[in-house]
Amino acid sequence: MLARFTFILLLLCNYCFAQKIDWWQHDRFGMFIHFGLYADAARHEWVKNHERLSNEQYQVYFDQFNPDLFNPKEWARQAKAAGMKYAVLTTKHHEGFCLFDSKFTDYKSTNTAIRRDLVREFVDAFRAEGIKIGFYYSLLDWHHPDFTIDTHHPQRPSADTAYARLNKGRDMEKYRQYMRNQITELLTKYGKIDILWLDFSYPGPHGKGRDDWGSVALLKMIRKLQPDILVDNRLDLAGVPGGADFATPEQVKPEDLKSNYDGLPFETCQTFSGSWGYYRDEDTWKTNFQLLKLLITAVSKSGNLILNVGPTGRGVFDYRATRALDSIGQWMHFNDRSIYNCQEAPAGYVTPEHCLLTYNPVTKRLYVHLMNYQGGKLVLKGYKDQVKYAQFLHDTSEVKREKNGDDLVLILPERKPGFTV
Ligand code: JFZ
């Protein structure tokens, strides 16, 4: 009788407390993909803005676009091998070019030499690997004739007075309708979409924010079309209840990540090299260690990492990205239990120097990441009665330990074992 009662109670609790964001907080690690016409320029996805290119000048990248090696099954294979559980693709970036067969524009991949709906193929390939699907959609649009010229536009004037003159005939209400139409296409024609990553707001003089996007109505529409979808926080709806599901600290150094972003869970988005779109000559690639440190640090603060790849104009991952993904995958193969389902360690677990802690609240396992391996004694302050057993994760080998007052002292092998970073 008692047992049955407990059972029912448990079910009820699950029902009450399960949240739509649970899967995302368990999965922790995703892939961002920035792909568009800018891949052919190969010098930053903001090239149109940076070099103040007109639509006519930018047209050459549309005419050239032909990612003949585009094969999202291969992308999905690489994402999965790296341990990534969800992927977010730029369906349209600021340049305005659409990777999907939208009814509302001619500026789309189906009208280029490749003639294919790249979003459709991305969705099919990643879903087949069991990877959750996210769409990035740019609020900015440097191609649409009704999008008004602002501080972030390639054609921005140098004098304040010129904005009004340049914007004659442009109608943001028409642009808002265009966005609603396209987001409706994205959220109705491709099955269940797990994440919508809208980008971004810059309120202020000649900037754009919630009223320019029609953020409140847009979000309402999104939630109606896909009730379980997770939406990022770039609609300029800070303080509006339900205005965002997660925060998006961008290109933040690991030590600058916080545990709290106004009560929202966070996902830090990071590039391999600095630019999001493919940038041939960039030589600021992060090391494998830096990438792992970003992942572990994010989880140690109860956050996610979404790591970006910018495929080349042929439609494949650059060899440097492939190498980095491989290396993360090797680490994840042996250590992913310290990432999935993990979060910040409960208060009271002091972090030893040069370490990061992650914690699985279900198994109650604490993972001590030794970020700067040194053999010998590692003091865990105040852990005396907290630890039943200690082992290395990659090979289960026991780590000997001794008590010292309130502390627990781990005796680490002098030589660094394999697969610890
Ligand atoms: C945006 C894009 O401009 C960029 O190309 C890329 O897609 C990235 C993921 O998002 O960049 C931003 C957006 C917002 C901020 C900074 C960069 N911000 O709020 O600090």
Image (cartoon, helix red, strand yellow):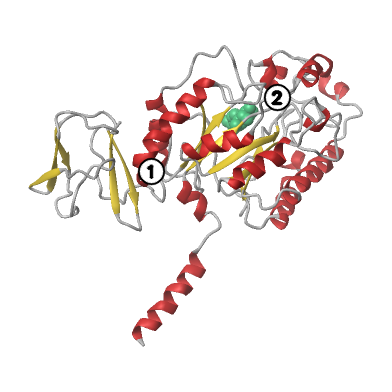
Where disc 1 sits, the SS reads: helix
Query: How far separated are the C-alphas under marks 1 and 2?
Result: 34 Å
For disc 1, the marked residue is 336
Q: Position of residue 251 (x, y in %)?
A: 51, 29
Of 252 and 57, the residue lying toward us: 57
Q: Is residue 50 left or right of residue 59?
A: left
Up the image or down, 126 lies above or below 188; here it is: above
Residue sitting at 14 percent across and 29 percent down? 414
Of 319 and 300, the residue lying toward us: 319
Quarter of the image where one finds residue 381: top left
Residue lying at the far right of the rendered structure? 169
Q: Visible in this render: residue 197?
A: no
Count of residue discs:
2
Residue sitting at 77 percent across and 28 percent down? 114
Q: Position of residue 124 (x, y in %)?
A: 66, 44
Where disc 2 sits, the SS reads: loop
Q: Position of residue 81 (x, y in %)?
A: 47, 37
Which badge, 1 or 2, is on the more N-terminal residue? 2
Up the image or down, 297 lies above or below 14; here it is: above
Quadrant including the C terminus: top left
Q: Give the amino acid at mark 1.
A: Asp
Q: Visible in this render: residue 334?
A: yes
Quarter of the image where one finds residue 1: bottom left
Mark 1 Cα shell of 10 Å, populated few (<14), some (14-19), many (≥20): some
Q: Give the amino acid at mark 2.
A: Asp
Residue sitting at 67 percent across and 21 percent down? 313
Q: Position of residue 98 (x, y in %)?
A: 76, 33
Of 316 and 61, the residue lying toward us: 316
For disc 2, the marked residue is 68
The residue at label 2 has a CB less than 8 Å from ligand 1: no
Q: Quadrant of ligand 1?
A: top right
